[in-house]
Amino acid sequence: MPRTVLIVDDEKSIVDILKFNLEKSDYSTICAYDGQEGLRLAREKNPDLILLDVMLPYIDGFEVCKILRSEGINIPIIMITAREEETDKVFGLELGADDYITKPFSIRELLARVKANMRRGSASETPVSETSGEAIRFKDIVIDFDRHTVFKNGKDLELTQREYELIKFLALSPGKVISREELMREVWQYDYYGDLRAVDVAVRRLREKLEDNPAEPVYVMTKRGAGYFFSEE
């Protein structure tokens, strides 16, 4: 069954181009032309990924992203923006977007980002104590590979797919310092499209959910000038 992409953009010509190329690449698509409709479809249709324009009627893309994340909806979101301001790009990531792409963009780049950000699995409703698949445990943290889910003291942390992939990659090599460039390559799966600031924002958001005190982390640690590592001490 093809993965579904929700396209939210008020420019019909852009929507038509995205729809054509995504469907040519074997994705199914749902389209919305304003933020209000995009929010409704995201809630009701549960797509595998959302392409979300920033400048939208009724509710802008930033607000749509903020609302979805506040409701615990962790569908991967790629923000589409014509803005060049660096603060706007970082702001979208801090609200919970997984990635952004700036107009004008090449279809090849967009498809690469869709593929890299596409959700790889869905969580089951089985309690963590009843799982039979592979998991790793560190103190009060359980990373469940079967359901792409992280639990702390038995509670689902409700990570985005990107946050889950980030902690999984770090935790599989505890104590190893991994550079931002390697994280971008291995977790984001980008060789030359990526923005290293996305790594820093994702780490910050992960710490906010994972750590008792994000300002004094005990799991996801920084090695100044070198990168990040997962501490099991």
Image (tube, grey):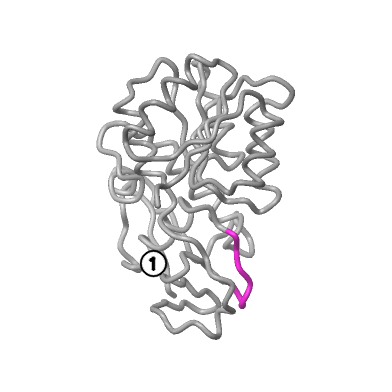
The one nearer the camera, 216 or 129, is 129
Q: What element carries label 1?
A: helix
The one nearer the camera, 41 or 76, is 41
| Residue 6 highlighted magenta (yes or no) | no
115 relative position to 99: left or right = left
90 relative position to 69: left or right = left
> Which residue position is annotated with label 1?
171
Q: Where is residue 193 in the image (x, y as percent from the top left)?
A: 31, 31
Residue at 49% over, 61% down: 122
Residue with the most extreme left position: 191
161 relative position to 178: left or right = right
Q: In the figure, 116 relative to 231: above or below?
A: above
Q: In the figure, 136 relative to 168: above or below?
A: below
Residue at 41% over, 15% down: 104
Q: In the figure, 39 relative to 202: above or below?
A: above
Q: Position of residue 1 (x, y in %)?
A: 40, 52
Residue 52 found in image quarter: top right
Q: Position of residue 21 (x, y in %)?
A: 36, 27
Three-letter amino acid code at disc 1? Ala
| Residue 155 highlighted magenta (yes or no) | yes
Q: Give the range drawn in magenta.
A: 152-158
Residue with the most extreme right position: 58
Q: In the figure, 178 relative to 78: above or below?
A: below
Q: Position of residue 58 (x, y in %)?
A: 74, 23
Residue 92 found in image quarter: top right
The one nearer the camera, 228 or 183, is 183
181 relative position to 122: left or right = left
Quadrant assignment for the C terminus: bottom left
Q: Local crowd at mark 1 within 10 Å, few (<14), some, or many (≥20)?
A: many
